[in-house]
Amino acid sequence: MNIVYTDNNATTKVAPEVLKEMMPYFSELYGNPSSMHSFGGNVGRKLQEARERVAEIINAEPEEIIFTSCGTESDNAAIMAAIELKPDKKHIITSAVEHPAIKNLCSYLEKKEYSITYVPVDREGRLDTELLYSTIESKADDTAIISLMWANNETGVVFPVAEVANKASEKGILFHTDAVQTVGKIPIDVKSAGIDMLSLSGHKIHAPKGVGVLYVKKEIKFPPFLKGGHQEKGRRGGTENIASIIGLGKASELAKAHLNEMDTRIRGLRDYLETELLARIPSSSVNGDRKNRLPNTLSIGFDAVEGESILLLMDQAGICASSGSACTSGSLDPSHVLIAMKVPFESAHGTIRFSLSIYNTKEEMTHIIETMPPIIKRLRDISPFWKQ
Ligand code: PLP
């Protein structure tokens, strides 16, 4: 059975072009880029090429790119740098719907000496900018950093980061954005958006798992998160994950070239899937602002059924997606994102996230559209909550 993979916000397949470019660096080209000899130096040049390619997709300078081990490390390093740079400031502003990479670090810091403002979202997942801006006004003197995701991993809702970055800069507050889900899906320009720090992750854009980037504006004197060797200009110790970094460089180049296709063909496939599922399955609804979403993401709730059961039946039909409940934490509660959006319990519980990549096809969408209605019907027939 062929797999229909629509879980690309969880992870993506490594692009064949990426793997091809990585392969020699596992075998014959194994030099250390920090070595004095030319065997290592050649690897150093390839590392620099990767830095340039990654910089290009977000319109940064190559020297503003720090390679890390993942998006989580980048997120953690950004916040920890800010609180080290601003030791007198004990307040952090973030949103109520961040990825655990930010959310759990903030909860940890809350147990220390920090207060955190978690800016709420409305029923559509849109940020409460009024509350955000009044918090910036009233707490500017004590705020070390504002960290806001550029787009949400579950709903795809895009936050107005350029506008917030601008307000932050007026008040002299550092601004970080978690763009792990955004890079490669919509254009990003750190310069015009006025971003101080930005996180991205390789495995969301068809590079391997275990490599990420923290962009840090060159004016910021960045204190290293990993203290060690002089790698990454002393901003992150540790011998570089060369093959994966080279893969990320190639993946960035491909992602940039595919942005137009994301906005047209993939958006079209997502809309086709969405329209047909809503039409064919009664009591189904989309989570998140449909006018301001990533082009590849669809979060859709089916009333009175349970996400994990839907996923199991989808799995039997060869379809990979995610649910909107936090089953990995051992509970079947809806995710903190759907709770923050006040999505009704019966719909949040039955929420499925489809996330597409440029490898998806219309035939695959048609397969999902034909497979889902009988699955939902079967589960509703045995659901005590289904009343129609
Ligand atoms: N931030 C967001 C918005 C994400 O979706 C993810 C991964 O799903 C991360 C951060 C963490 O990235 P990584 O898996 O590379 O640590």
Image (tube, rainbow, N blue to C red):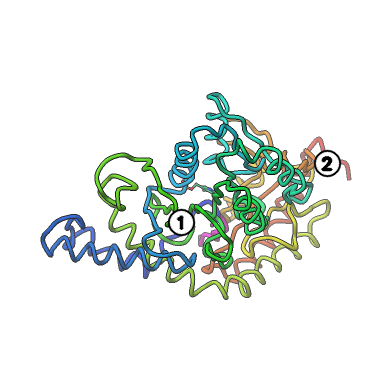
Q: Quadrant of the C terminus?
A: top right
Nearer to us in this view, 179 or 286 = 179
- Taking the spot 49% from the left edge, 54% from the top edge, the residue there is 11
For mark 1, what is the residue? 217
Seen at 66% across and 44% down, the residue is 324
Q: Secondary structure at mark 1?
A: loop
Question: What x and y, as percent, mark residue 316?
Answer: 58, 51
Q: Which residues are magenta?
A: 1-8
Instruction: Describe residue 332's horizontal placement relative to residue 57 as left or right.
Output: right
Q: Residues within 10 Å of mark 2 (few under 14, many from 20)?
A: some
Task: Kindly report which numbered mark, 1 or 2, lies closer to the viewer in this rendering.
Answer: 1
Q: Position of residue 211 (x, y in %)?
A: 38, 52
Q: Is residue 46 visible?
A: yes
Precedes in sequence: disc 1 or disc 2: 1
Residue extending furthest toward the left: 37
- Of residue 139 and residue 267, the one placed in the foreground of this image is 139
Q: Is 97 rendered above or below residue 195?
A: above
Q: Quadrant of residue 182?
A: bottom right
Q: Amino acid at mark 1?
A: Lys
Assess mark 2: CB under 8 A from ligand 1? no
Q: Where is residue 376 drawn, in percent x and y? A: 74, 50
| 102 on left or right of 26 | right
Q: Magenta segment: does it hold 5?
A: yes
In the image, is residue 293 above or below residue 90?
below
| Secondary element at image label 2 | loop
The number of callouts visible is 2
Quickly name the residue at label 2. Answer: 386
Q: Amino acid at mark 2?
A: Trp
Give yes or no for contact between labels 1 and 2 (Cβ–Cβ under 8 Å): no
In front of the other: 92 or 7: 92
Q: State the residue in front, 217 or 208.
A: 217
Residue 260 against residue 271 in the figure, above or below: below
